[in-house]
Image (cartoon, grey):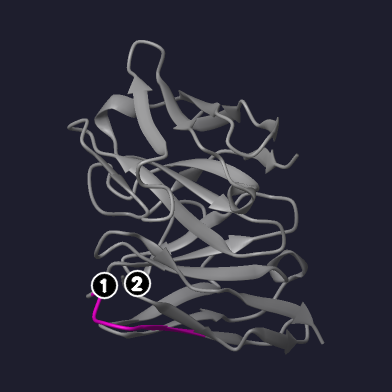
Amino acid sequence: EVQLVESGGGLIQPGGSLTLSCVASGFSVGTNYMSWARQAPGKGLEWVSVIYSSGSTNYADSVKGRFTISRDNSKNTLYLQMNSLRAEDTAVYYCARGPYTSSWIGLDVWGQGTTVTVSS
Amino acid sequence: EIVMTQSPATLSVSPGERATLSCRASQGVSSSLAWFQQNPGQAPRLLIYGASARATGIPARFSGSGSGTEFTLTISSLQSGDFAVYYCQQYYKWPLTFGGGTKVEIK
């Protein structure tokens, strides 16, 4: 079964750091584009970052320079390291496969999400 | 960045009726457009990609159309699980951007 399971969320003070993990099953994170998206409480969806199958990365301007996406192919796991966290980073964070797998099909598999709350 | 605008913000429809949702891009995105459904407390679910292709397991009552800057999601006969929030998203150009969502509620 194709599945993504996130973990690592929690309550963190402003300025702090947190690393989210996303374990994939049923496919390889290393051969697909993998993305992170987030959803602030009561708000819409916001794309955060992508790691291409080549290993190159891309970020939304709102997190550029503070967040780092990475993967460990041996563990089939995607990561999001978040530094210098701000109150506006409070959200449910989702990992997702895509938007490119073997073709451009959008974000076709999503995890259940992990909640990050930035507050003192 | 490409701004995605969805309308209406809320759509009130009776079960069994047809729902038509719109999405407009601030610049052309070809057919690189996806639609997602999100129920309360759940992750988004991909419904449509490539503007009109149904994702795996999506019922035929969901259909997408359009290209360039104007897109439509049609739900032909609303069932109970279809009352949810729907988002469009372009993946033509980075950053990926989502519309603000349309909430489909029971009339």
| Disc 2 packing (10 Å; few <14; some 14–19; many ≥20) | many
The total of numbered circles placed on residues is: 2
**Seen in the image, is B83 located left or right of residue A66?**
right
What residue is drawn where x is 70% and y is 41%? Answer: A117
Q: Secondary structure at mark 1?
A: loop
The circle on residue A63 is none
Q: Amino acid at mark 2?
A: Ala
Q: Residue under circle 2?
A: B51
What residue is drawn where x is 64% and y is 49%? Answer: A87
Q: Would residue A60 be counted in the magenta stretch?
A: no
How far from the left and from the top, in percent, is residue B15?
A: 77, 81
What residue is drawn where x is 42% and y is 27%? Answer: A78
Q: Is residue A85 above or below residue A16?
A: below
A2 and A107: which is toward the camera: A107
Q: Secondary structure at mark 2?
A: loop
Residue A54 lies in what quarter of the image?
A: top left
The answer to whether mark 2 and mark 1 are in CB contact below 8 A is: yes
How far from the left and from the top, in percent, is residue A112?
A: 63, 39
Question: What is the C-alpha distance between the residues marked 2 and 1?
Answer: 5 Å
The circle on residue B31 is 1
Question: Is residue B58 in view from this perspective?
Answer: no
Mark 2 and mark 1 on one chain = yes
Magenta residues (range) = B22-29
Q: Amino acid at mark 1?
A: Ser
Task: Single out the residue that lies furthest toward the right.
Answer: B107
How far from the left and from the top, in percent, is residue A36?
A: 45, 43
Residue B53 lies in what quarter of the image?
A: bottom left
Who comes first in sequence, dot 2 or dot 1? 1
Name the chain letter of the residue that bears numbered label 1. B
What residue is drawn where x is 41% and y is 12%? Answer: A75
